[in-house]
Every structure is written in structure tokens, then in C-alpha cells.
Amino acid sequence: MSQPINENAARPERGRAGPLKTLFVSLMIVLVGAALIWLIFKTEPTATRKDAARETAMLVDVRTISRGDFTPTVEAMGQVMPAREVTLGSRVSGEVVSQAEVFSPGRQVDKDEELLRIDPADYEAALLQRRSELMQAQADLEIEQGQQTVARQEFELLGESIEAVNDALILRKPQLNQAKARVAIAEAAVKQAELNLARTRIRAPFPAQVLSREVTLGSQVSSGQSLGRLVGTDEYWVEATVPLSKLRWLSFDANPDAATAPVRLRHDTVWPSGQNREGRLTQLVGELDDNARMARVLITVEDPLALDQAAGQPPLILGSFVRAEIDGQTLEDVVRIERGLVRRNNTVWVMEDRKLAIRDLDIVFQDQEYAYIRNGLEDGDQLITNELASVVGGARLRLEGDNNE
């Protein structure tokens, strides 16, 4: 009798074969992926540094260099301040009875122009009194001189000799000296009265601009009281600060009449573009600026309000800050190039035989626009002025119009 086939007994064999197959397939996928990744990295192109020149010459712009003598510019910031400033004060007391129309803030006044007048009545009366006292003293002196003459005549008639001391008394010399002293005192009193009367007229001591006025018509003023403030209009100062490292490039002369370095003043935020005022470097102030710790220099500007110059010159305003461009000492036998052409680490790019050369520079001075070079460039050198994407010594170069090799 035949045994029945147990189908369930064969199923475990097929169940074990399934996971093995899946594992094998997964392992193959991993291995194939790893092989592909290895192949990709193995065959990836790599960047290599080449010292050799590029196959294609780079297009450049060049400028031929020449040596010469140049005047560098030292740039500084400065504040406008008055060269002459005075506070008017009264030397006598009284009521202001007259005031000039020009004695107002912002107006210009001429030298010796009358600005105010204090009531002169009391001082005129005092002058009359002092003059009468002088006349009385002079009369007393004349009388005493006559008495001295009479005394001398009487002494000569006596014909007697007396001691020198008694001689002075007999001839009334002490009385004569007293009379002369009273005349001198009276003359001094008259002069003082005349001065007091003249001081009732307040005048401008120099050509000036009125900055402030502290009294007006009818004000009562006392001796020493402030009446107003004036600044001279013939010249202003600009006090500028200069870095100590650039101070040696500036020239100062102890002689005030000597020619000094010219200065150009600019007020970029106020004056139109390209407009400036001319000045001259006057003096080095022997003290550092408290805030920036830089050297202080004075620049003199004549006619700061542009009163005598052609129309269009901007006036200087006291207290404003301006930019000063000071001409420095002349640099002899140097090369001047724009600062933007100085490359990293103080180098420049030069074309030599249609190839790129990198030169180290000995820079003597740099201002806002230029670099002045003592060594590194010579006459006839062709300086590359444009930017290059790749800078390699010995790279081939070409100019506009050359064949692209």
C-alpha cells in the first residue's frame, strides 16, 4: 500500500532557498555599486599646477614707464578757525547813543569804522575842566618864573656871596620845580580826558566780520563790558592734523615771508565738484592733537570770504571741516603709478618679451592717488594696467592687434 505524499514536508526547503537568494542578489548589488564608485573616482580628471606658459596668450593693456621728479600730496582734514579774533570791550561807561547799521552779525566792517558811540557829554565836560586846570598851572608857572627873575636881580644887587644851599632858596628853585610839576600833572590829566572822550567811539581795529553783538542803542555799558565779537576777514587759518609718518615730507620755513608749500582745500559735501580754495602751509604747531595723536599744522587762506576774488569762489565758514591737499617735498628720480596698479605684497606686473614678469617694488611714498617707486621699475618698462584672471610668471602675453597665437 503506497504512502501518501506529504506536501508540507517539502515547503521548508523552498523557504530556506528564498532568503539565500535575496541575500546573494543584495550582495552583488553592493559589490557592483562599490566597483562603479571606485571606477568613477579612479577616472576623475584632476587639476594640476603647471609652471609652463599657457597655450593661449593673455590679452593685456600696458603703459610705458618713465622716471622723473614728482611732487606728492599729503592729505589731511582740518577745521577752519579765525587768524585774528577780538572781543570788543568798552573802556568807559555810559549810554549807547549811536549804533552803526553794519554792526550786526554777519556784516563786514572796515578798519577804524565807527560801530558804537557812548554818550560823550560827561567826558567832554571833564576835558574842559582838565584843560582849564592846565591853563591855571601854566599861569602859575609863568608867575613863578617872573618871581625867580626878580629874586635873581635882587641877589645880584646885594653883591654878597652865599652858600650853594642858600642860593637855591634865594633864587626860588624849589617853587619853580613845584610849578613845573603842577603843569605836567595838568597835561597828563588833559591827555587822559582826551583818551576817555575818544573811547566813547567804538571802532573796528581791522577789516572784520561781525560774529555777535551784545548791546544796542540805549544800552547802559560799564567799563570792561563786552560789546560784540569780530574776526578778521583778511585771512583765516585751517588747523589740520597730519600723521607723524608723513610729517617729514612737509616743508616749514621759520621766515614768514618765505615761499611755503601750496595747499588745495576742498569741501566735498558743500562745494560743487572740482571747486577748491588755495592756501599755503604756514606753521607746525608744537603739540599733538589730543584725540587722534597726530601732528597739528596751520594753513593760511587769504581773503577767506572771497570778497576780492572773482565770482564763483566759495567762502570759508568758521568751524567747518575741510579736506586739505598739501604739496610735499619733491621726490627726484622716481616712478609714479596709480595705487591701484600696485598688486599684492607690493608687486607689479610687467610685460617682458611678451611674457609676464612679477616685480617687487621699493615704494618711497604713497598718497591718495599715486605710489612713488624708487626701485623695481625702470625707464621703458611696460606696466600691465588691466586685471588678469591667472597670474603665472612667464605666462605668454599679447597686445590688442596682435595675432592670437
Image (cartoon, grey):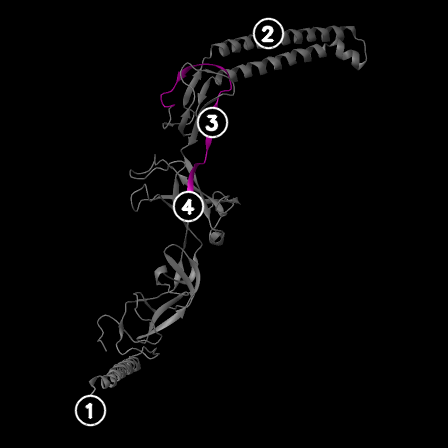
In primary-sequence order, the first of circles 4 and 1 is 1
Quadrant into which the N terminus falls: bottom left
Amino acid at the residue labelled 2: Gln
In primary-sequence order, the first of circles 3 and 2 is 3
Farthest residue toward the front?
Answer: 1
Instruction: Using the image, determine if residue 229 lies above or below residue 293.
Output: above
Label 2 to label 4: alpha-carbon separation: 67 Å
Q: Look at the image and give the residue range highlighted in magenta.
A: 78-103
Residue topped by disc 1: 3
Amino acid at the residue labelled 4: Met
The label shown at residue 77 is: 4
Image coordinates for residue 349, horizontal then vertical, percent: 35, 69
* Residue that appears at 38% across and 54% down: 368
Of the residues tagged 3 and 2, which is closer to the observer?
Answer: 3
Residue topped by disc 3: 87
In primary-sequence order, the first of circles 2 and 1 is 1
In primary-sequence order, the first of circles 1 and 3 is 1
Residue 383 visible to an observer of this rendering: yes
Image coordinates for residue 298, horizontal then vertical, percent: 46, 43
Binning the other alpha carbons within 10 Å of mark 2 as few (below 14), some (14 to 19) or many (20 upward) gives: some
* Residue that appears at 62% across and 12% down: 183
Amino acid at the residue labelled 3: Thr
Q: Secondary structure at mark 1?
A: loop
Quadrant into which the C terminus falls: bottom left
Residue topped by disc 2: 136
Amino acid at the residue labelled 1: Gln
In primary-sequence order, the first of circles 2 and 4 is 4
